[in-house]
């Protein structure tokens, strides 16, 4: 019986690993060789990365989720000042930011979104936004400080805005230029 060629052998190995669903083994096999281009063809990654929505639909759902996030955040902030409204505030404000984050998943897909969140130009905004999300919940549930929770919400909203602006070419530069001309 003839032995398969090295290329055919690699293809058989790849098919076996890729379609068995063993992501760890697949990634290990990819990284142990010069097959990094095959990584994106792994079936679960294809599903996560590919979008079957049209561009118009993706833009509409981005806008809907982002506006829903802003509305939830504003509603949560309004509920903060009601008696015993701190927990409602935390829930609505958290849902608002999750909806706003999810909105960008419609533009690029969830896997690319996660990769993009931790790119160097967005890393600080992502970490600060997530940090203030956690600090807001701590201020509400453990520390029970309305003023501190409001400060964290403002900082969280600013970090989320800065993060969102990073997806628009030259938007951060325009904002910096606008504020620097207004302040000085």
Image: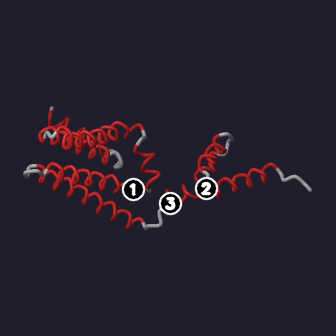
Find numbered disc 2 in the image and state the secondary structure of the residue it sits on.
Answer: loop
Give the camera-side residue of 106 and 16.
16
Q: Nearer the viewer, mark 1 or mark 2?
A: 2
Give the class, few, some or many, for how many residues have Cα within 10 Å of label 2's Cα (few <14, many ≥20): few
Q: Is residue 111 left or right of residue 22?
A: left
Q: Quadrant of residue 66?
A: bottom left
Q: Quadrant of the C terminus?
A: top left
Return the disc, 2 or 3, that comes first in the chain's sequence: 2
Return the disc, 1 or 2, that comes first in the chain's sequence: 2
> Residue 67: horizontal and vertical position, in percent?
24, 59
Q: Which residue is mark 2?
A: 21
Cα separation, mark 3 vs mark 1, equals: 11 Å
Number of on-image labels: 3
Q: Which residue is mark 3?
A: 50
> Residue 38: horizontal and vertical position, in percent?
63, 51
Residue 146 drawn above or below residue 48 = above
Residue drawn 34% across the image and 57% down it: 103
Residue 75 drawn above or below residue 28 = below
Residue drawn 33% across the image and 60% down it: 62
> Residue 44: horizontal and vertical position, in percent?
55, 57
């Amino acid at each position: 019986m003839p032995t398969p060629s090295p290329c055919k052998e690699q293809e058989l190995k790849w098919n076996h690993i890729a379609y068995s669903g063993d992501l760890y083994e697949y990634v290990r096999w990819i990284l142990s060789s010069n097959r990094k281009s095959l990584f994106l063809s792994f079936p679960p990654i294809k599903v996560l990365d590919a979008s079957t929505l049209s561009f118009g639909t993706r833009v509409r759902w981005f806008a809907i989720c982002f506006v829903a996030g802003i509305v939830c955040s504003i509603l949560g902030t309004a509920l903060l000042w009601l008696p015993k409204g701190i927990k409602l505030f935390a829930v609505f404000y958290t849902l608002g930011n999750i909806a706003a984050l999810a909105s960008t998943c419609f533009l690029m897909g969830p896997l690319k979104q996660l990769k993009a969140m931790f790119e160097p130009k967005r890393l600080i905004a992502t970490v600060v936004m997530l940090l203030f999300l956690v600090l807001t919940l701590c201020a509400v549930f453990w520390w029970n400080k309305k003023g501190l929770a409001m400060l964290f919400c403002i900082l969280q909203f600013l970090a989320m805005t800065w993060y969102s602006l990073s997806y628009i070419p030259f938007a951060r530069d325009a904002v910096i230029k606008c504020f620097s001309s207004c302040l000085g």
